[in-house]
Amino acid sequence: MTMTIAPVPRAAEPAPPAPSATAVALRVHTNAMPAGTESVLRRCLAPGFRNHDVLPGCSGGPEALAATMHWFHDAFGDQRVEVLQLVADGDLVALHVAFSGRHVGFFRGLPPTRRRFTVREMHMVRVQDGLEAEHWVVRDEAWLERELRADGPRP
């Protein structure tokens, strides 16, 4: 008579904890966006992600944030994002940042000036299950355009 011993089922490994809302917001807006890495950006976005500040012709889903990222990469090189203030409350994170770069491509019809610039931005991010679920941004693009058009010596 042969005896078969069934293996004892192992307890499922607990899932690693989701990254904090702050970590998610920083990963997206200080790393993936300035680096122009769409694959990383998309992995950081929740199903049903909603971008509330979109370029004309975009629906507001993940493609809207990717389109903004590509628009900025076509216009600006040497991108950097410095976090000036960060406030988190539960699943919401507010980032006050200084976005800087060099004007290397067309921006709002303005040909490249090679000028360096810094513009302030405010981002609000809602995180769900360790992924960015919603995004709002306010930036002074009128100031940036004036800065790029300014007369004076070129760097």
Image: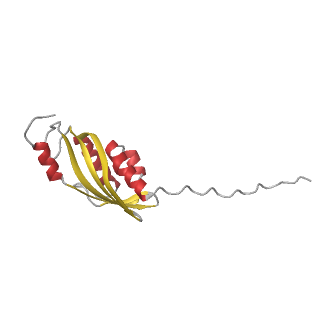
Q: Position of residue 149 (x, y in %)?
A: 10, 43
Residue depicted at x 68% and y 58%:
11
The image shows residue 79, relative to residue 143, as above or below, that is above
Instruction: Tell which residue pokes out farthest to the bottom in this image.
Output: 90
Instruction: Tell which residue pokes out farthest to the right in this image.
Output: 1
Q: Position of residue 33 (x, y in %)?
A: 33, 47
Query: To which quarter of the image does residue 100 belong?
Result: top left
Residue depicted at x 38% and y 55%:
25
Query: To which quarter of the image does residue 75 belong?
Result: top left
One can see residue 109 in this view: no
In the displayed structure, does residue 9 sit left or right of residue 147? Answer: right
Q: Position of residue 122 (x, y in %)?
A: 27, 57
The image shows residue 3, relative to residue 75, as above or below, that is below
Instruction: Tell which residue pokes out farthest to the front in this image.
Output: 84
Instruction: Tell which residue pokes out farthest to the left in this image.
Output: 151
In the displayed structure, does residue 2 sit left or right of residue 89? Answer: right
Circle count: 0
Depth order, front residue of 5/136:
136
Residue depicted at x 29% and y 43%:
80
One can see residue 65 in this view: yes
Q: Position of residue 60 (x, y in %)?
A: 30, 58
Residue depicted at x 87% and y 54%:
3
